[in-house]
Image (spheres, rainbow, N blue to C red):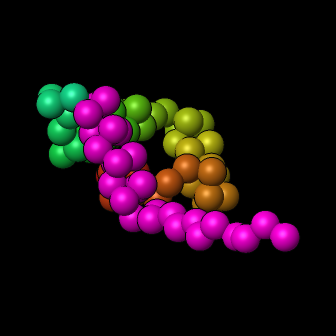
Amino acid sequence: MASLIPFTLDPIAHEATRLAAVLDALGPHWNPTDIYTGEAQAHRMLYAHLDADQQATYDVLLAAGALPDTPEART
């Protein structure tokens, strides 16, 4: 009968390697704060100046949970 060979896997080391590869692929100019700020601005612009019908549809979608309820959405 063959003997079993011990096998160990360190998921933390693998995750660190994966994270390093992701950050390397994103490059040095990736800035999550700028990205979030840009997304918030785009969200405000997208839902600004809605007419009455658009606002009613937006409110229905918001109430149904189809759109995120953010502070930008309520202004």
Q: State the residue lying farthest toward the right.
A: 1
- Give the residue at x 27% y 39%: 23
- Give the residue at x 49% y 33%: 51
Residue 60: x and y in percent read 64, 52
Residue 13: x and y in percent read 36, 59
Is residue 47 visible from the viewing direction of this image? yes
User: In the figure, is residue 14 to the left or right of 8?
Assistant: left
Q: Quadrant of the N terminus?
A: bottom right
- Give the residue at x 53% y 67%: 8
Residue 73: x and y in percent read 40, 51
The quadrant in which residue 70 appears is: bottom left
Foreground pick, 7 / 4: 4
User: In the figure, is residue 53 to the left or right of 31?
Assistant: right
Residue 21: x and y in percent read 33, 38
The image shows a total of numbered marks equal to 0
Q: Is residue 14 magenta?
A: yes
Give the magenta range: 1-26
User: In the figure, is residue 19 to the left or right of 61?
Assistant: left
Dominant secondary structure, magenta: helix
Q: State the residue lying farthest toward the left.
A: 28
